[in-house]
């Protein structure tokens, strides 16, 4: 994606810098666009745990490069299995992480130790390139949905802006490029469709307020940040034409895990007849499980993310302030599961399908 005319991906390797892996430190956004240079497996693991890199497809891609960095130190099979397990355990909910590590291991287990570093970089690069292509395809399929809404509005007359609502950040910075939920929105904007995005702030870490707002602003897409509890009200007023979110894991029957609060938006969307779409590459589908509510592990993060809020003070310093009384306990489940019955459909790289076992099997007969 371009920022001030320069095209970026959210992860890249620099051959002129010892093949180190470069990412943007997402904990510094939107205040600063800082590049972080990762040179070893421990640094990669730390960057994922601390959410300097985040977003389901991106953590998979970065972890794949993490394994390449680890192999530079020790390319024996024992070390490879150990480092792969360490990287895979950094975050539990997004399936892309495990998928990427499994894909790397499948190739590397059949590779001589002496060739593993080269092959690992190559495979991680392929994972990145495929993610970009898949997200671009998701953008095109999702664009058709937005075009339909725009055409219906044109036929009806009156207010012409297509009003979308999204939760968390499923933009280019959460993937290698384009994003999932935001890809159709970027393409609609680029195609000249008048879109406006309600951006849920997405407490506790504010990925919407910090990252989605930054992304949309950088691309010139009209948007307004709203508190997490505003979505239902906006839908009741007829101010949302479509909800579109990303996901961290979709089960074979179409249940959707995504950032905490997504389920409430889906419930409100159903109550107000607002279409609720989920955008995902096939790497986010976990074909091994069916019931999302009982089978998807939900990450429990630090209470401090709830008791404190990070922001920029008027002197420019980025700081964390406490918003609860001293000693108050806090729970912090980071994801929830939206049952398939509340999902209008899935936007995948192959096209649109029902959020159901039959819909997914018909779209992906080679995986199901
Ligand atoms: O905890 P995060 O910020 O990694 O959670 C991210 C999300 O929930 C995204 O919506 C999801 O990963 C899709 S990203 C294309």
Image (cartoon, helix red, strand yellow):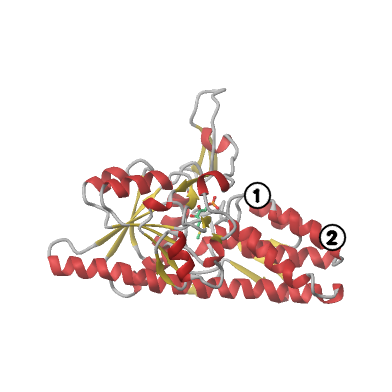
Camera sees residue 2? no
Q: Quadrant of residue 141?
A: bottom left
Left or right for 363, reference 243: right
Provide residue 261's location: percent of width, then percent of height: 43, 44
Q: Quadrant of residue 191?
A: bottom left
Residue at the spot x=69%, y=51% of the render? 89
Provide residue 226's location: percent of width, then percent of height: 35, 46
Provide residue 178's location: percent of width, then percent of height: 47, 69
Which is more toward the observer, 161 or 87?
A: 87
Camera sees residue 315? yes
Q: Nearer the viewer's eye, disc 1 or disc 2?
A: 2
Left or right for 223, reference 278: left
Q: Quadrant of the C terminus?
A: bottom right
Q: Would the CB of label 1 be found within 8 Å of ligand 1?
A: no
Query: Which numbered disc covers residue 49?
Result: 1
Residue at the spot x=54%, y=61% of the render? 285
10 Å neighbourhood of mark 1: few (<14), some, or many (≥20)? some
Element at label 1: helix
- Mark closer to the chain start, 1 or 2: 1
Q: Gap in Å between the C-alphas at discs 1 and 2?
A: 21 Å
Disc 2 target residue: 79
Residue at the extreme left of the image, as rendered:
157
Residue at the spot x=47%, y=60% of the render? 357
Element at label 2: helix
Residue at the spot x=31%, y=49% of the render? 269
Q: Quadrant of residue 333?
A: top right
Which is more toward the observer, 179 or 33?
A: 179
């Amino acid at each position: 994606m371009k920022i001030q005319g320069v095209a970026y991906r959210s992860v890249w390797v620099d051959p002129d810098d010892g093949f180190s892996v470069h990412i943007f430190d997402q904990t510094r956004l939107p205040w600063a666009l800082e590049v972080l240079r990762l040179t070893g497996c421990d640094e990669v693991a730390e960057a994922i745990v601390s959410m300097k890199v985040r977003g389901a497809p991106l953590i998979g891609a970065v972890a794949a490069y993490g394994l390449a960095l680890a192999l530079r130190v020790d390319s024996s099979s024992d070390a490879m299995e150990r480092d792969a397990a360490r990287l895979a355990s950094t975050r539990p909910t997004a399936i892309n992480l495990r998928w990427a590590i499994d894909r790397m291991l499948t190739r590397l287990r059949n590779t001589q130790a002496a060739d593993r570093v080269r092959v690992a970089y190559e495979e991680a690069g392929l994972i990145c390139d495929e993610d970009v292509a898949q997200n671009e395809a998701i953008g095109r399929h999702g664009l058709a949905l937005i075009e339909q809404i725009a055409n219906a509005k044109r036929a009806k007359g009156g207010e012409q802006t297509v009003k979308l609502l999204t939760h968390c950040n499923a933009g280019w910075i959460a993937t290698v490029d384009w994003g999932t939920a935001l890809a159709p929105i970027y393409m609609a904007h680029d195609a000249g469709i008048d879109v406006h995005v309600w951006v849920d702030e997405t407490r506790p870490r504010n990925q919407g307020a910090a990252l989605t707002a930054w992304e949309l602003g950088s691309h010139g897409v009209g948007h307004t940040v709203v508190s997490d509890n505003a979505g239902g009200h906006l839908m009741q007023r007829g101010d949302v034409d479509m909800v579109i979110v990303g996901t961290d894991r979709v089960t074979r029957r179409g249940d959707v895990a995504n950032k905490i609060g997504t389920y409430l938006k889906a419930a409100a969307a159903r109550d107000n007849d607002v279409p609720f779409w989920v955008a995902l590459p096939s790497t986010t589908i976990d074909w091994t499980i069916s019931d999302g509510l009982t089978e998807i592990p939900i990450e429990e993060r630090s209470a401090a993310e709830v008791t404190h809020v990070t922001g920029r003070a008027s002197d420019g310093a980025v700081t964390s302030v406490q918003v609860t009384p001293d000693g108050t306990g806090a729970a912090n489940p980071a994801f929830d599961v939206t049952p398939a019955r509340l999902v209008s459909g899935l936007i995948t790289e192959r096209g649109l399908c029902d959020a159901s076992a039959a819909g997914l099997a018909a779209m992906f007969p080679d995986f199901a």
